[in-house]
Amino acid sequence: MKIELRQDYTYSLLVPTSMGVRLTPLNGQPVHCSDTFVMHVTSAETNVASVSSYLGLPVKVLTTFVKGSPIARLIKDNLASRHMDYEGREVDQGGPWGYRHQFNIADSGSGSRGPRVHNDRAGEVGRTLNAKDFDLERIFGQEGVQIVHLSGLIGALSPDTGTFCLEIARAAKRHGARVSFDLNYRASFWKNREKELHEIFAEIAGAADILVGNEEDFQLCLGIEGPEAGGQDLAAKIEGFKGMIERAKQAYPNASVFATTLREVVNTNCHKWGAIMAAGDSWYVVEPREITVLDRIGGGDGFVGGLLYAILKGWEPEKWVQFGWASGASVTTMLTDYAQPADEEQIWSIWEGNARVKR
């Protein structure tokens, strides 16, 4: 199957997001034992978009900034270095107790010690994202977008951002853009907001052409019955996921692509990494293969980014999941949360298991 994409467009991929920074100790050390940290710009949605932007497709980011903040300047410079266009309202900080960009403080883990991530999102400026701050008719009608990628992280960030994501999805559908939706359930975001967010997520999922999520995401975001309890072997997991997706297809018939990653953690630096995708009536499975992990954060985003890039390129579905798997594996070899592929060949070499030196 192929996904028909709009041919008159300025942007291949558009992502709404709340930008922040990640602080990581050097050399895989724990946060509480460290006094030296590296700071990187991050967001799940721009992690996804980086595969396309580094490989030459036009990408646009919709976000919001703290006016006059050096962190905002760092973010803008980083997005430009990733070959991404961006637009967003400048919000007054409102004094030292006002708005700021989120901080993500992460221990990458090492060997037998697993990673730990602490999110510090108080006063996050991204919670103010609002559709009225963007000319959606210009963006989707005049400029044109092939795929818009939405994340449940942004949809659940605040009541404003939930409405914002709904308006983005509606505008995308009016103007012929395809919608990708990564459910990304977070219990702390959903607390005491279950009914409100279920309605928002259900509408976005109803508009989506591509739905990404794990068992928990589909069950808790959309109320889809999960896999039956049983054995934990790979075959049972895959069959259980297939059954859940068949139920999701009945509930959300607009979507033609469903995908998730499969991961078994041997230790922090050694994972078995796989993926499963349904495209139309066909299933594509990458059985988990061992990969060496420098830093696992962003691997799932890299998978989605590679999947969307392959769809945008018009490849056959078998290559969508393969390129997604390899893009996700690529991210785990980097200290940034996002892939920075030199070219398509570098990603395909990972898929082929070819780590020989290229001269």
Image (tube, grey):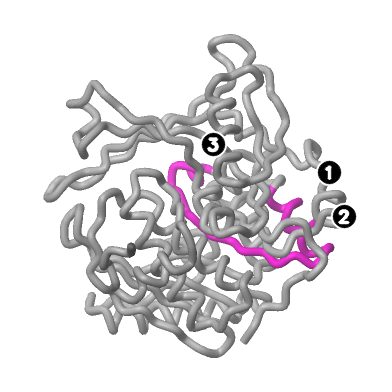
List the residue tagged with mark 2.
142
The amino acid on which the numbered mark 1 sits, given as a three-letter code, is: Asp
Q: Residue at x 26, y 67 (%)?
A: 356
In the image shown, does 80 or 134 lie closer to the viewer? Answer: 80
Residue 6 at x, y percent in the picture: 77, 70
Q: Residue at x 68, y 63 (%)?
A: 147
Q: Looking at the rendered structure, which numbered label has been put on residue 78? A: 3
**SS at badge 1:** loop
Q: In the image as oriented, which residue stretches furthest toward the left?
A: 112
Dot 1 or dot 3: first in sequence order is 3
Residue 309 in view, yes or no: yes
Residue 222 at x, y percent in the picture: 55, 64
In the image shown, does 107 or 73 lie closer to the viewer? Answer: 73
Left/right placement of residue 58 relative to residue 265 reads right
Quadrant housing residue 174 = bottom right
**SS at badge 2:** helix
Quadrant housing residue 285 = bottom left
Residue 236 at x, y percent in the picture: 29, 82
Image vertical order of residue 131 relative to residue 55, above or below: above
Residue 286 part of the magenta-drawn span: no
Per the model, the C-alpha gap separating discs 3 and 2 is 27 Å
Label 1–label 3 contact, CB within 8 A: no
* Dot 3 crowding, Cα within 10 Å, few <14, some 14–19, many 20+: some
Per the model, the C-alpha gap separating discs 1 and 2 is 10 Å
> Which quadrant does the N terminus fall into?
bottom right
Left/right placement of residue 149 relative to residue 4 reads left
The part of the chain drawn in magenta is 165-192
List the residue tagged with mark 1.
135
Instruction: Choose mark 1 or mark 2, whichever is in front.
Output: 2
**SS at badge 3:** helix
The amino acid on which the numbered mark 2 sits, given as a three-letter code, is: Gln
